[in-house]
Amino acid sequence: MLTDLIQIQRLGEKKRPENEKFRKHLKTHNFAVRRFKQLAAEVEASIDCTLCANCCKVANTPITPRDCERLAKHLGMPLDGLRKQYTTRDEEDGLILKRDPEQGCVFLAGNLCSVYEARPSNCELFRTR
């Protein structure tokens, strides 16, 4: 299975006309959304996120005040300390977790989340969207 995001992007760009044609077909032929979601779930179940962790390496992670509280409690630190040390503001996404351009999310350790039990709701819901 292809997991390199650059290769996936290039392939997507190469197949853009085909993908647009497919989306148009789905819209005009009343393709059952339920069936599509079922297929997506089957593909998703076959993906082991710990093999690449690309999502955590390239995406911003917006966090809510509740996420901050949960992370601060998990890390045993004051809320203000968590915000200063681990978050930043982004024009588009608001409050986000800090990230290193090379390594990704500040809480990514290799390909694993070091705060998995207290991860932000955005991360928890990511695969179910």
Image (cartoon, helix red, strand yellow):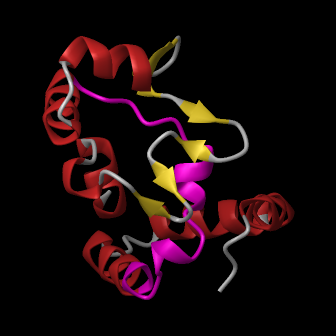
Whether residue 114 appears in magenta in the rendering, the answer is no
Q: Is residue 70 left or right of residue 21?
A: left
Quarter of image, res 10: bottom right
Quarter of image, res 3: bottom right
Residue for point 30% across, 22% down: 82
Residue 56, position as x, y percentages in the image:
52, 51
Q: Nearer the viewer, residue 84 or 98?
A: 84
Eyeballing the image, is 97 above or below 48? above
Q: In which quadrant of the rendered image does the C terminus lie?
A: bottom left
Magenta-tinted stretch: 43-64
Residue 8, position as x, y percentages in the image:
74, 66
Residue for point 80% across, 59% down: 6
Eyeballing the image, is 15 above or below 9? below
Eyeballing the image, is 117 above or below 40? above
Residue for point 60% across, 59% down: 54
Residue lying at the far front of the rendered structure:
76
Residue 108, position as x, y percentages in the image:
49, 52
Q: Nearer the viewer, residue 68 or 15?
A: 68
Residue for point 23% across, 38% down: 75
> Is residue 109 among what the camera can see?
yes
Q: Count how many numbered circles sit on residues in the image.
A: 0
Q: In which quadrant of the rendered image does the N terminus lie?
A: bottom right
Whether residue 48 appears in magenta in the rendering, the answer is yes
